[in-house]
Image: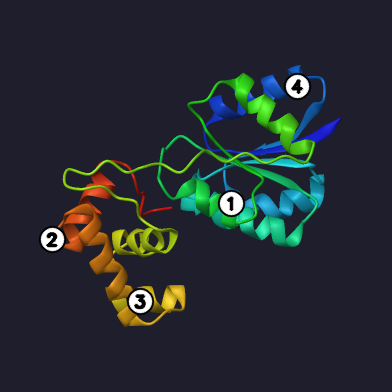
Amino acid sequence: MHKVLIIDDHEFICDSLSHALTGTGIFTVAGMLPSAAGAALYCERLRPDLVLMDVCTEGGVSGLDAAKALREKFPGVKVIVMSGFDEITYAPRAKEAGAHAFVLKSKSLGFFMEVARNVMQGETYFPEAKTIPMPMGEAPLTRRELEVLRLICKHLSSKDIAEELFISESTVKYHKINMLAKTGFKKTVDLAFHMISNGWINPLY
């Protein structure tokens, strides 16, 4: 039996996943908690084989940051990141954090169980990259451009973005120019507003 730790601040999600996992006959739920703040402590105590980690957890704690920390401290633990938001950066950031899969909560419980079984057998799952619909032009943004855009949405200055990504300020400005050319927007603030208002980027997580 594979021991599972579920981290989600919605009791209904935790109960549904727990019931489905138990029903497979190959998983047992070792614990559930609402905040990723206690992820490392619970992994230390419970020694789960698999962690199901929501991106947005109680207290504003990022499940993506927690996933990265868990993979570094407990390399043998499998991590599946999940979210109810179809945010453009979550899947690639989960992969970069070392997670083994990213699943949207809109998927069926059956799909969750299939991914969980496959992950325990050494497989990974990440959805295909999306094309962002824009009112003007298209947005085949690069991974680095999306990183810059996410930080713009958090109201960081070019200098702060450069420090965060360990690049020069002129490189940040270069990425901004490219993003505007690709998307058809004249100002980065308008592009950021479009991304946030349509749910493509969540600046809080």
Question: Residue 186, labelled with which disc?
Answer: 2
Q: Quadrant of the rendered structure where residue 98 is?
A: bottom right
Instruction: Specify which label sits upstream in the sequence, 1 or 4.
Output: 4
Give the Cα distance between marks 4 and 2.
53 Å
Q: Nearer the viewer, mark 4 or mark 2?
A: 2
Q: Nearer the viewer, mark 1 or mark 4?
A: 1
Q: Is residue 153 left or right of residue 40?
A: left
Q: Residue at (40%, 46%) from the top-left corner?
A: 88
Question: Residue 160, labelled with which disc?
Answer: 3
Quadrant of the image for the N terminus?
Answer: top right
Name the amino acid type tagged 3. Asp
Q: Nearer the viewer, mark 3 or mark 4?
A: 3
SS class of the residue under badge 3?
Answer: helix
Residue 159 appears at what percent x and percent y?
32, 80
Q: Residue at (76%, 19%) from the top-left corner?
A: 24
In-front residue for pair 204/125: 125
Disc 3 + disc 2, Cβ < 8 Å? no
Q: Which residue is mark 4?
A: 22
Disc 2 + disc 1, Cβ < 8 Å? no
User: In the current view of this chain or complex, which residue is farthest to the left?
Assistant: 186
Q: Quadrant of the rendered structure where residue 130 is?
A: top left
SS class of the residue under badge 4?
Answer: helix
Instruction: Specify which label sits upstream in the sequence, 4 or 2.
Output: 4
Instruction: Specify which label sits upstream in the sequence, 1 or 3.
Output: 1
Name the amino acid type tagged 4. Thr
Residue 66 appears at what percent x and percent y?
60, 55
